[in-house]
Image (cartoon, grey):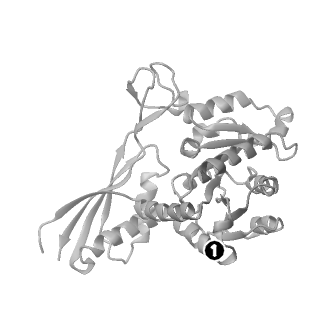
Amino acid sequence: MHLPISDKIELNILHQNSHQAEKNKVKFNNYNLLCLNIMSSPGAGKTRLLEITLEDLSTEFQSAVLEGDMTTNLDAARLEKLNIPVVPITTGRACHLDANMVSGGLKLLEKKINPHILDILLVENVGNLVCPAEFEIGEHFKVALLSITEGEDKPLKYPIMFREADLILITKVDLLPHLNFDINELKSNISSTNPKADIIEISSITKSGFDLWQKWISKKILKFKK
Amino acid sequence: MTKCLILSMEEWAEKKNKEKIIVEKINLKIGEFTCVEPISLINTFNAAVLGSWLDSSQITIETIPFEGKCSKCNRSYFPKKENGYKSPCCNFNLEEIISGRELKIASIDFKEK
């Protein structure tokens, strides 16, 4: 038996995921396809947001969805009704999508459609405010949703999710008159955690804010395709 | 995260000839501003490697403090949830993170058989 050796490697634990995420991004770029990673806690309104958004975008852009869910294809089935390419990714016991799963989803998407004709790929992550924040998937932008029924303190309690997001959508704002909720406190907590994030208030019931959200997406797609 | 750690170890061991080494310690640096709870990582790792080539290895974790920099006066500070991560000097929002996002294998202590 030899003496112990210390190998100083200083290696990121997530480097394999980051490496695959980089490969995914190269693929997205080659397809000229903007990828958004949509994240939130369960029930914040991700799927409803996508239903409305995909319909709104359809006049101008070609979209596709990778739909992450732990155990069912229920959300994917909802989105398939919009006649856009949807690939369900069932994560099993995993509480987040990782870059390998997205790579697999992209391969299935390539069998359904030529991605060159697409403008935007929306990836709905598993409902969870913790792990999805740490796992890059090759996205160009991260979008985090936070519904007002979750409370003003969530950006402080789950800071990494809100720190990592490029855009934060405050959802279900139609409920504001019925709740004891301070939206300014929420916005202040978001800014404390991530002063650079864009913030848009939206309601899937009244459709308020969807014009701003759609403008945000259009601007990102057009800038990306330049 | 445990799976990622084990995959990283497998990748490292491939270059070393796994059959000829015994890993004694895996020394990690985990930042305070990550989604990793050190004790949970140790417990899940110990359970996951039972009976494998990493069975006898131990994890040590050096916690890296969460440190930010005030963008107004450039002083470093330790952001606290209780005051919204703002700088205590100028009450500015957290713009720059100096440390606390680390998720690293710093070093691996091993013996050759």
Residue at 59%, 40% (x, y): give it.
Answer: A157
Q: Report whether B74 appears left or right of A168.
A: left
Q: Amino acid at mark 1?
A: Glu
User: Where on the picture, by quarter, is residue A34?
Assistant: bottom right
Direction from residue A143 to residue A159 in the image, left or right: left
Callout count? 1
Q: How far across and down, in percent of the image, does residue A89 sit?
A: 65, 70
A218 and A105: which is toward the camera: A218
In the image, B109 versus A108, the foreground residue is A108
Residue at left 39%, top 68%? B6
Quick one: which residue is furthest to the left in this view?
Answer: A2
**Residue A23 drawn at (x, y percent):** 48, 65
Q: Is residue A194 left or right of residue B87?
A: right
Instruction: List x then y, in percent, for residue B72.
Output: 45, 21
Task: Determine crowd level at label 1: few under 14, some 14-19, many 20+ residues with C-alpha closer than 10 A.
Answer: few
Task: Check the picture and name the quadrant holding the C terminus of chain B.
Answer: bottom left
Q: Is residue A185 above or below residue B50?
A: above
On the question of residue A207 being in view, the answer is yes
Q: Helix, strand, or loop for circle 1?
A: helix
Q: Residue at x 32, y 76 (%)?
A: B53
Residue A202 in sight: no
Task: Find disc 1 in the rendering and name its residue.
Answer: A110
